[in-house]
Amino acid sequence: MKKVLIGIGTCENFEYVEEHCLGKIFSQTYKDFDVLLVDNSEDIIHSMHLRSRWGSEAKIMHIDRAAIFRDACKEIRQYILDYALYNNYEFLFFVDIDIILEEDTLTKLISHNLDFVTAPIGYMYQTYSTCFVQDFEEKRSSKVPYLPPLKPITWTMMEYEPYFMEIIAVGLSCALVRCSILPGIKFKVTHQIQAMMEDFFFCSDIRKKGVKLFLDKTIHTIHAHVKMPERKWRRL
């Protein structure tokens, strides 16, 4: 059994980036990992393509896709989490299929030996990341239980010290989690509050357990989104 499970969700809509993402996954300098690729495409044709291309290197599973995007994300995350616990991995590395890693990303993250640590993530065409700290100026209460009011860290602030810092919440696009903190965690979403995806509730739930979340600013990722000018990530 490997030490780390890298869990990635995908579907036919992300075929444009799978080769780039998975190529970087399998070229990581840290090698003690397995890969679980969970595909919720509308039919199994995409899964068959994935097995043909990556089946010798990754465990590939197909699950049904929920009608609502948030529910579909939640179900993929939960499948990955349950698989990691059932198979007794020490760490679970959540990676989104449209995130392109540097080859030493996992080496850097696991070197911290923490319960939760993430790389900077977000859309590069925006001014802010999806890594969040407490907003002490916001007087309204948070809409997420056990989380204070939040504000995103801007990409400009990512360039300044501290280069390693505690945060409050983050998307799970490139997050390494110690599996011993995961029992009892059930991903959830809400459809009444804007942007309350499964990752925010996950951060809330592990904070309730006393887990601190950390950000390593020295790691660089590319969110290979279709809005990137000329899709420059293809040249990486």
Image (spheres, rainbow, N blue to C red):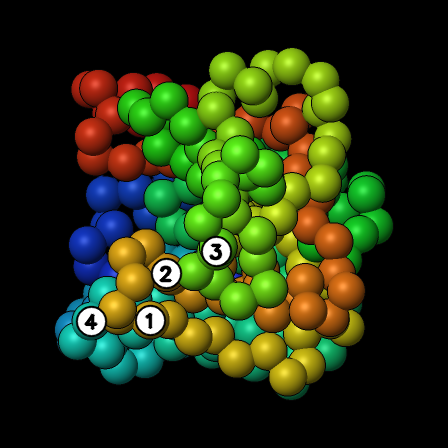
Neighbor class of circle 2 (other Cα within 10 Å; few <14, some 14-19, many 20+) is some
Q: Position of residue 122 (x, y in %)?
A: 42, 36
Mark 2 and mark 3 lie on one chain; the one further toward the N terminus is 3
Of circles 3 and 1, the one toward us is: 3
Q: Which residue is mark 3?
A: 142
Picture quadrant of residue 63: bottom left
Q: Position of residue 78 (x, y in %)?
A: 48, 76
Q: Position of residue 233 (x, y in %)?
A: 34, 25
Determine whether label 1 and label 2 are within 8 Å by CB. yes
Q: Secondary structure at mark 2?
A: loop
* Separation of marks 3 and 1 at Cα, in angstroms: 14 Å
Q: Residue at x 17, y 76 (%)?
A: 67
Q: Secondary structure at mark 4?
A: loop
Labelled disc at residue 190: 1
Q: Quadrant of the C terminus?
A: top left
Q: Which of 157 and 47 lies nearest the eye of the viewer?
A: 157
Q: Which residue is mark 2?
A: 196
Determine whether label 4 and label 3 are within 8 Å by CB. no
* Separation of marks 4 and 3 at Cα, in angstroms: 24 Å
Q: Residue 201, can we see it?
A: yes
Neighbor class of circle 4 (other Cα within 10 Å; few <14, some 14-19, many 20+) is few
Q: Which residue is mark 4?
A: 68
Residue type at mark 3 is Ser
Picture quadrant of residue 184: bottom right
Of circles 4 and 2, the one toward us is: 2
* Separation of marks 2 and 3 at Cα, in angstroms: 11 Å
